Amino acid sequence: MRINQSLWNKTSIAVLMLSLALAATPRASGEDRTVSTREAAELFAVLPDGASGPEGLTVGPDGNVYVATFGFNAAGPVTGLGQLYVFNRQGKLLRNVSVQSSSPHLLGIAFHPQTGALLVIDFGGGQVLRVDPFTGASSVFMTVTGSSGLNGITFDSAGNVYVSDSAQGIIWKTGANGGPGTAWVTDALLTTAGVPPFGANGVEFNHEETTLFVANTGNDAIVQIPVNNGTPEKPVVFVNSINGADGIAIDAHDNLWVAANQNDEIDVVSPTGKLLARLGDFEGLTRSGTPRGLLFPASPAFSGNGEFIYVTNLALDLRIFGLAEAVDSQWCAQVKHYTVSRIRTRFTPLGAGRD
């Protein structure tokens, strides 16, 4: 076939001009490309078959990851004792401990920074237990009054213990050695009529201990309680619109890392209330019924070296409580294997590198 020379020349010139134009077009820098890409949540550990949804999580002084289960699976509530699972830094299960004298419904857990005691919230029992992380032997650490919904736990530098009450809108306080809790703060901002029906949930102090931040799950809000020399002042809303604000972790810069259980993500919020990043996402289930990414994330905690943040995937189908369906309820109903995820903590803040 004979090619028209004039047409060939025109085509060659057009291709050359297009190539030059593409070469001259500025490309997004690596930083800019990162801005539009979420840091993925990777699988850290899978709980053994038969485990219920994991809720509470803490990293121990030994660097191991301690996980307590909420006592609900896709079929509804389970019976028996509450369960504690211990994983090493590589996500290998070291042991499964039955928490003695507990209900099956455990929530927040944490090691006391001064005494070293492992404290576990027994949501179903309305109490906080001191638990031996090897044998599961327990004793009562703190009791409260009323129809409680104890949920999150934190400490101040003096060793006092603070526990959120999702049902009564109270922050309870006791000393380092435990005892009956006293109502440190009671406020309507710590209650909710929303969905999920948990008011005060995750609790953390900023580093100067001038503010206690409290997640209100049903209100999609973070409440701040100003603290003046240990005395609480009137709570106010710090920030709104975190969909299902659950557990909180605070980094070295006083940024809040909040598990948004209804958005299947971790929201990173500055001390001024500015959204810095949204990390992780739900990516469906494997054929074996294991979540990919985050599914109803509940409790975050940083690794010892700060490289990762771990988070439990509660995968809770709200319909088992007679509540209206959430967008991920049908996915939660299909879960057969519950998981813990981790996310790398280095991220590019939203808008970084933009003009």
Image (cartoon, rainbow, N blue to C red):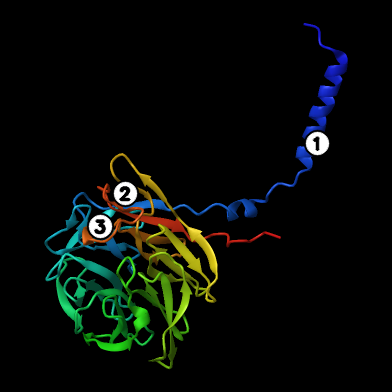
Residue identified by numbered label 3: 319
Disc 2 marks a residue whose amino acid type is: Trp
Rendered location of residue 229, percent (x, y): 43, 93
Q: Are marks 2 and 3 in contact (CB under 8 Å)?
A: no
Left or right: 340 in relation to 31: left
Q: Earlier in the sequence, mark 2 or mark 1?
A: 1
Quadrant containing the C terminus is bottom right
Rendered location of residue 158, percent (x, y): 36, 88
Q: Nearer the viewer, mark 2 or mark 3?
A: 3
Residue identified by numbered label 2: 331
Between 332 and 300, the one lying in front of the other is 332
Rendered location of residue 26, percent (x, y): 74, 47
Distance, label 1 to label 3, CA atoms, is 59 Å
Q: Are marks 2 and 1 in contact (CB under 8 Å)?
A: no
Secondary structure found at label 2: helix
Mark 3 Cα within 10 Å, few/some/many (few <14, many 20+)? Answer: some
Residue identified by numbered label 1: 20
Mark 1 Cα within 10 Å, few/some/many (few <14, many 20+)? Answer: few
